[in-house]
Image: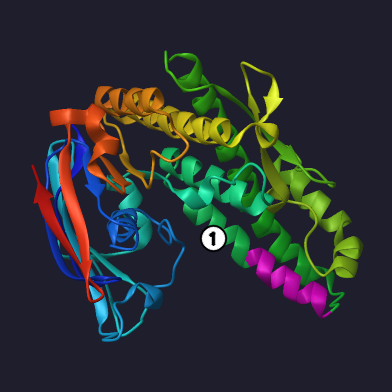
Amino acid sequence: MGSLHLSHLSLSHFRSHKKATIACDPRPIAIFGPNGAGKTNILEAVSLFSPGRGLRRASAEDMTRRPEALGWKLSGLLHSGDQTHEIDIRSEGGTARQVRIDDKAAPQTALARISRVLWLIPAMDRLWIEGADGRRRFLDRMTLSFFPDHAEATLAYEKAMRERNRLLKEQVSDAHWYAALERQMAASGHRIHRNRQEALARLSSAQEAAETAFPTAELELTQSEGGMPDTEKDLRAALSESRFRDIAAGRALVGPHRSDLYGVFAAKGVPARDCSTGEQKALLVSLILANARALKQDLGAAPLLLLDEVAAHLDQDRRAALYDEICALGAQAWMTGTEPGLFEALSERAQYLEVTETQGISEVSESR
């Protein structure tokens, strides 16, 4: 398999971009410009070439350009190995986004079959010290990169859990209703747990096998009170036994939605939550790179990388090391920064785009 990259990206009425067309090659892409110019909006557009809600977790309506609110459209040429796919993603009048692959309507989940996209954004810098929800989403994005069906398992689990929670809040006591939903939760929940564990094993292996300037993170999937049973049968039994406690709580207290990701700075033996801001950032970069290395080993091509304000909290040496690793991977990394000097160590190994903003409209131009 050859490289995975976009050679063309166009944005129409997307966020601050009224119209933008970007032609590129497999090299990394350094995007620079002042804060608020619309750099991150380009990365968000690329993130939609994978399943899910994108790097901002925004609704389709929130992505439309104001004040026109006409809806928006993204199109791109995605090269995946020896195949090239035309992808069209759009939302009309605030409706849910629609995907077409090679001029055929497709579900969002179909994007996972032809594309892999990983990202690191400033909102994730506090990952280790904030709530478990963010860490689960972080883990599930990495897991999805290895297992395209992970999204389907997650959606199935959440749908069944919402229905069961509704019964709990209404204090319904009919065991047959619960049993049917618990079977669904146990089947999809076990898949979620198994996929997460396998993803962590692959990340660990990818970190151990690499010589890198970034610290290794030891990762563990932990459980809150109630735990996560190892088998589908045991999870179904645990859900059944927990009904009375769950009715009192108004929600399910057992299952993969109660899991957490625990990280340790391996060289120091210090929990990630207790590390310095710079160390926490370096650990996140290390995990993204490990994820990319593992995917390249599996698929023969590195994923698309989206690194927003990646230079923040990284010193000059670590920035240079990061760029070296990205180039060694052969990844098309879309990176943003406020000024071109942040990407000096990349030199001619990258493409450069300047983003400016005039009267609320972003403009993109090639630089160099």
Question: Which residue occupies the foreground of this view, 313 or 1?
Answer: 313
Display colour scheme: rainbow
Question: Which residue occupies the foreground of this view, 11 or 318?
Answer: 318
Q: Residue at x 58, y 39 (%)?
A: 196
In the displayed structure, would residue 17 be above or below residue 233?
below
- The answer to whether 296 appears left or right of 58 in the picture is left
Q: Which quadrant of the view contains residue 220? A: top right
Question: Which residue occupies the foreground of this view, 35 or 52?
Answer: 35
In the picture, the quarter occupied by the C terminus is top left
Q: Position of residue 321 (x, y in %)?
A: 35, 22
Q: Is residue 101 visible?
A: no
Membership of 167 in magenta stretch: yes
Residue labelled with disc 1? 155
Q: Residue at x 31, y 47 (%)?
A: 336
In the displayed structure, would residue 73 be above or below residue 270?
below
Q: Please name the predominant secondary structure of the magenta segment in the image.
A: helix
- The answer to whether 228 appears left or right of 327 in the picture is right
**Label 1 amino acid?**
Leu
Q: Which quadrant of the view contains residue 175? A: bottom right
**Image: magenta residue range:** 160-170
Q: Residue at x 63, y 41 (%)?
A: 128
Q: Is residue 236 visible?
A: yes
Q: Position of residue 238 (x, y in %)?
A: 82, 50
Membership of 131 in magenta stretch: no
